[in-house]
Image (cartoon, rainbow, N blue to C red):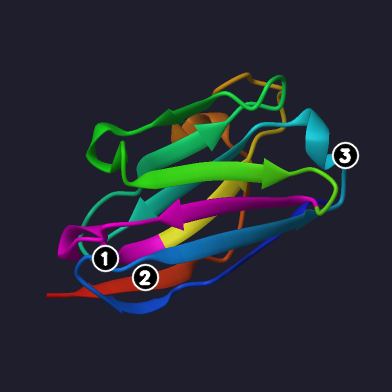
Amino acid sequence: QVSLVESGGGLVQTGGSLRLACAASGRTFSLYAMGWFRQAPGKEREFVATISWIDDRTYYTDSVKGRFTISRDNAKRTVYLQMNSLKPEDTAVYYCATPKIRWDLPITSSQYDYWGQGTQVTVSS
């Protein structure tokens, strides 16, 4: 059974940085894409970033390009989301996820099957 556990959320001021981590277990981590999503209060869950299992290519939603970086450490079975220049509109619960199918760069929530419990990120103005 696949398990995902996020950590690293917290409260930060506008312009600050946080690094989220997601530790995976239950199957061969290196053979599947990993993604980050977020959900703000009263809004739908939205895609943030994904990283390929094939060659570590990445893809981001436009609003975080140039500020967020997704990376993975296959030896540690962990995916990271480095978030810089944070804005109040980045406030949300952040979730990591991984699919059952070996998609290259999945960007829709329907492509993901396993989800973490989420970690809160709050950016104060």
Nearest to N terminus: mark 1 or mark 2: 1
Amino acid tagged 1: Thr
Give me the residue at 17% from left, 65% from top. Answer: 88
**Mark 1 to mark 2 CA distance (whole Å):** 5 Å
Give me the residue at 84% from left, 52% from top. Answer: 1
Q: Residue 91 colored magenta?
A: yes
Disc 3, SS: loop
Disc 3 designates what residue? Answer: 28
Q: Is residue 106 visible?
A: no
Badge 1 density bin: few <14, some 14–19, many ≥20, Cα 10 Å: many
Q: Is 30 on the left or on the right of 66, as rendered?
A: right
Q: Quadrant of residue 43?
A: bottom left
Disc 2 designates what residue? Answer: 121
Give me the residue at 37% from left, 65% from top. Answer: 17
Q: Quadrant of residue 74?
A: top right
Instruction: Give the residues drawn in magenta, as a range.
Output: 77-93
Amino acid tagged 3: Thr
**Mark 2 to mark 3 CA distance (whole Å):** 29 Å
Amino acid tagged 2: Val
